[in-house]
Amino acid sequence: MEVLWESAQALTPQLIAWRRHLHRHPEPSFAEQATQQFILKELGHLPEIARRPAGGTGIIADLSTDPKGPWIALRADMDALPIQEVERAYASERPGWMHACGHDAHTAMLLGAAFVLWENRALWRGGIRFIFQPGEEKSPGGATLLIQEGILEEKPIRAIWAQHVTPQLPVGKVGLRPGPFMAASDEVQVLLRGPGGHAAYPHLTPDPVTAAAYLLTQLQALSSRWADPRAPTVLTFGHINGGRAPNIIPEQVTLVGTLRTFDESWRSQAKALITRTTEGIAATWQLEAAVEFRPGYPVLINDPELTALTHTWLSQLLGPAHIEALPLWMSSEDFAFYSHRIPACFIRLGTAGNLPETQQPVHTSRFDIDERALPIGTAVLATIAVEALRYFQRHP
């Protein structure tokens, strides 16, 4: 582990350069062409690595030291978010787009892990699949495309890991949780429609605006009264659209939000309750209603045995005091799709430093990381790969 740590630390200037290049050149989900070419070019410096495009704008890279040995996979996402970044030295050069969720760091650290593992390939036997995945931010997610292409079956992959930058944890710490970890997420679209009319005569025209306001308050009972208190549930509407003038009752109002749950049975029941409540309120207000659910990501499940092993390995690398036990996480990740196919472990990497910008939440224009986390995350991935292959050699 000390050798891997030292190799990762020695790579720090390159990790920072990779991350800042990617940060300055963010690309939307499933449009990561320049990012793909950049990664393929950098991987080209490792002669033994087999690399190819996958999932449209993603990349699969394989490094093997034993064709008959076990295989594991490491994954990073690459896409950016439609956010205008605040000014900083290495700010996005693409107006309206920003790496506000740390995917630039994820990609740089996975690249770094490939270099560290290539440099220290005498230490391990087996195969490592590096997955540079497109479209994590856009449902249904790039993971589904890669899985459909068979990337988990082409090689005898025993398990998969990924990590995510986390401003809630300081640099030097990582967070783990076995079992269900991150929520399932579904997009909810509600349409309330009527004939429209003059604002001066509300008694003559069903009002979808008032009905929408009433509906919003009633749907909050989904989590406060309908859900089992032991089953975390969040329903949030982040977009409402209706009307164009103050003196017109509009013909329709649309509401768009997300439903987040941890139980598949309750997930189905919750959708039925949302539909029934919407249709009931629409009928009361003499409006037409349409409810549509766009399936998102399932619950992300960290395999308990794999997570326990990862805890042991990272405790040896970083020290037991640097491993945090995490609560349930209500945000969602398309890494969840992998976790329903093979044993998986999703790690939270601390990236908060002393500067205020490194403590800002993800998905905001102010988000940034303390770059001291880059060699740590690289060492985390490299250590997991080596230790996992050794473990699977002993447990075929």
Image: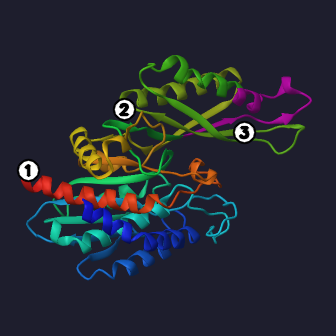
Q: Quadrant of the N terminus?
A: bottom left
Disc 3: which residue: 252
Which residue is outermost to the top? Answer: 225
Where residue 60 appears, x then y in whole percent? 31, 69
Q: Is residue 61 visible?
A: yes
Q: Amino acid at mark 3?
A: Gln
Residue drawn at x 60%, y 27% as measured from the top left: 278
The residue mark sitting in front, 1 or 3, is: 1
Give whichever of discs 1 and 3 has the lower sequence position. Answer: 3
Residue drawn at x 48%, y 69% as measured from the top left: 16
Range of magenta residues: 188-213
The residue mark sitting in front, 2 or 1, is: 1
* Residue 395, disc: 1
Question: Quarter-wise, where is residue 86 in the image?
Answer: bottom right
Neighbourhood count class around disc 2 (C-alpha, 10 Å): few under 14, some 14–19, many 20 upward = few
Give whichever of discs 2 and 1 has the lower sequence position. Answer: 2
Q: Is residue 221 above or below residue 263?
A: above
